[in-house]
Structures are given as C-alpha cells and as structure tokens.
Image: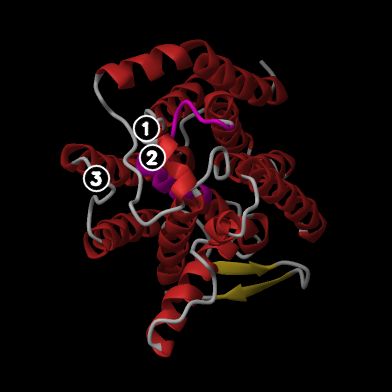
C-alpha cells in the first residue's frame, strides 16, 4: 500500500465509520441521558439545544486512533500525538461528566481545568523537547530562531492555548469542527510533502473523523463534541504544529480560534477595567453576532469561509 493510499484510506475509513455508527452512538448517549446542559445566561435561541447528546468527542478520538493504528507506523511522534488526544480528552471527559452529574453547565473550575491542562502540556512538551530540534520557524521571513530551554515552555503554552481556544470556539453547530478539519488538512498536506507520511496519516484520520462527526453536528446538530472533543483536538493540533515546526503558522491557520480567544480576553479585561462595561454583546465573538440577530447558520458558514481563506494564505507562507 503506497503512502498516498494510506493517507486517503485513513480519511475515508474514519469518515465512513463515524457516519455508519453515528446513529447508534447518538441513541446510546440518549439512553444514558448524556445530554448538553445550556448556559443559563447564554443566547435565548440555545434553549432548544438543551438535552442534545454530547461527548461526541469520544468516538472522534477512538475512531481517529484506530484509523491511525491501522494505517500508520507507530513512530515516536505518532505515539505523542495519540497521547495528547488521550490526556486532554480525559480532562474534557471529567469536565463533561461533572456537568452531566450536576445537571448544569458547570464542570471543572477554571483553575482545576487549567492545572490539569498545564501538567499534561508540560509532559507532552517534555517528550517533544527530546525529539525535535529547539528552533522556531518564522513564516514569510523563512528563517529559524534558536530558542533553547525556552522552547520547552513555548510548546507547553501553545498546547494549552490552542486547546482552550478550540474549546471556546465550540459554541455553535459545526462551528469548531470545520476549522479543526481544515487545520488538520493543512498539516496533512505539509506533512506529506515534507516527507512525514505517518503524521499525514494521523492528520488524515482526524480529518475523516471530523467529517463524519460533521454529518451529525451540522445545523441543527444531533450531536455535540463536548469538552472531551474540543480540548483533545486542540491539543493534538498544537502537537502536530510543533512536530512539523510550523508553530507560528498555527496562529494563521487556526485564526478563527485565535479571534475567539482574543474576544474573550478583551471582553473580560475591559469588563474588569471599566467597572462592568462590555466591548461585545457577548463573548466569545460568535455569540456577539448571534445577539445582533444574525442567523446561526450564516455565522457558522462565514466562519468556515474565513478558515478556508486563512488556510490558503498559510499555504503561501510555507517554506
């Protein structure tokens, strides 16, 4: 089996497995009463989403890993990528499970979640620090910066930041999974062209799982990924960016996630400094557009369009 065929099969297999078993997964989640609890101060239009099966990130992770194991050689970097999925998936699972047990949209506290993310990120960063060179590629300028021990801290920061940014983006039907799939698709192409065929297979497995999940997550969603999905996919994306030495380019390729995260930082910061005033009607920014009256599908598709444009620009920045 050629390398290209392995990559293609990883995408197709993951997608079709999810599509075929998706209804069974949704029905099982319903029987277990694993449904989404909506934030009380969120947009009023979200009330109808209450009870929609969640934790769809679990099959995304499992199908992606199984497809990777089947079609890729388990190199050191592939094992690290799988570990990042599992560690951050476990954090998201605990967070989701607490919400379900409490029957409210409050899981781990921000401090608890950040502590667990930081510990996991430092462990992954330590593994990567031993297997990649400690340089930072600067896109467009096409130059490298030597970072030394700072690279260890930078890698951990990238993993935690990306994980949280994807988590913040996951607020509308299909809003997060398409930019995630586009980003992994970008790194798939780069990995394959640069000779890292196994990493391309891993990226392909997630692209396929993402497409299969979108089959059920597209508006109106029948299934949500939950924190188990958003935290794990964000961490895995960051891990892939470090392995490919395209960490800074992730700021562009994952521009939607960056914008969503910045909108929250700006909102919270300005709220505290101004004594209660807001920049946006609601943060993250996709809720701001909702509160202005834009239909949810229009917001979603426009964010997808921006993701595609950013990916195209990113291709032009490759060395």
Marks 2 and 3, how far apart at CA: 14 Å
Residue 32 image point, x, y percent: 24, 21
Counting every numbered tag in the picture gives: 3
Q: Is residue 46 above or below residue 202?
A: below
For the N terminus, give its image quadrant: top right
For the C terminus, the image quarter is: bottom right
Q: Residues within 10 Å of mark 2 (few under 14, many from 20)?
A: many
Q: Nearer the viewer, mark 3 or mark 1?
A: 3
Decide which of tag 3 and tag 1 comes sooner along the chain. Answer: 1
Tell whether label 1 touches label 2 (CB within 8 Å).
yes
For label 2, the SS is: helix
- The structure residue drawn at horizontal position 36% and vertical position 15%, both measured from the top left corner, is 27
Give the image location of residue 254, x and y in percent.
61, 55
Which residue occupies the extreme right position in the image?
316
- Circle 1 crowding by C-alpha within 10 Å: few under 14, some 14–19, many from 20: many
Note whether residue 7 is visible.
yes
| Residue 260 vertical position relative to residue 74 in the rendered view, above or below | below
**Residue bearing the label numbered 1:** 54
**Mark 3 lies on residue:** 104
Task: Mark 2 or mark 1: name the one nearer the start of the chain.
Answer: 1
Nearest the camera: 225 or 33?
Answer: 33
Q: Which residues are magenta?
A: 219-237
Asked if labels 3 and 2 touch by Cβ distance under 8 angstroms, the answer is no
Q: SS for tag 1?
A: loop
> What numbered label is drawn on residue 226?
2
- The residue depicted at 62 percent of the width and 40 percent of the height is 178
Closest to the observer: 39 or 240?
Answer: 39
Q: Is residue 17 left or right of residue 319?
A: left
The residue nearer to you, when weighing 8 against 80, is 8
Please identify the quarter of the rendering in which residue 204 is found: top right
**In the depicted structure, whether residue 60 falls above or below residue 87:** above
Mark 2 vs mark 1, CA separation in Å: 6 Å
């Amino acid at each position: 089996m050629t390398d290209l065929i392995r990559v293609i099969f990883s995408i197709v297999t993951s997608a079709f497995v999810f599509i075929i078993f998706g209804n069974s997964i949704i029905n099982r989640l319903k029987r277990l009463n694993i449904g989404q609890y909506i934030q009380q101060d969120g947009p009023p239009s979200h009330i109808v989403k209450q009870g929609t099966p969640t934790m769809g990130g679990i099959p995304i992770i499992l199908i992606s890993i199984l497809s990777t194991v089947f079609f890729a050689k388990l190199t050191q970097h592939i094992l690290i990528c799988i570990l990042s999925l599992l560690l951050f998936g476990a954090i998201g699972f605990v967070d989701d499970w607490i919400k379900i047990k409490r029957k409210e949209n409050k899981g781990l506290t921000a401090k608890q979640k950040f502590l667990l993310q930081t510990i996991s990120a430092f462990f992954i960063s330590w593994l990567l620090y031993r297997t990649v060179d400690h340089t930072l590629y600067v896109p467009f300028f096409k130059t490298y910066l030597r970072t030394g021990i700072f690279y260890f801290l930078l890698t951990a920061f990238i993993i935690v930041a990306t994980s949280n940014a994807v988590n913040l983006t996951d607020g509308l039907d299909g809003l997060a999974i398409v930019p995630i799939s586009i980003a992994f698709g970008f790194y798939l192409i780069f990995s394959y062209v640069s000779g890292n065929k196994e990493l391309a297979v891993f990226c392909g497995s997630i692209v396929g799982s993402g497409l299969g999940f979108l089959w059920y997550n597209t508006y109106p969603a029948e299934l949500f990924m939950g924190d188990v999905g958003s935290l794990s996919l964000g961490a895995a994306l960051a891990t892939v960016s470090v392995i490919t030495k395209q960490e800074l380019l992730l700021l562009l390729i994952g521009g939607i996630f960056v914008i969503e995260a910045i909108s929250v930082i700006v909102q919270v910061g300005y709220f505290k400094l101004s004594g209660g005033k807001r920049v946006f009607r609601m943060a993250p920014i996709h809720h701001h557009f909702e509160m202005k009256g834009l239909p949810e599908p229009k917001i979603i598709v426009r964010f997808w369009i921006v993701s595609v444009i950013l990916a195209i620009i990113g291709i032009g920045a490759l060395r």
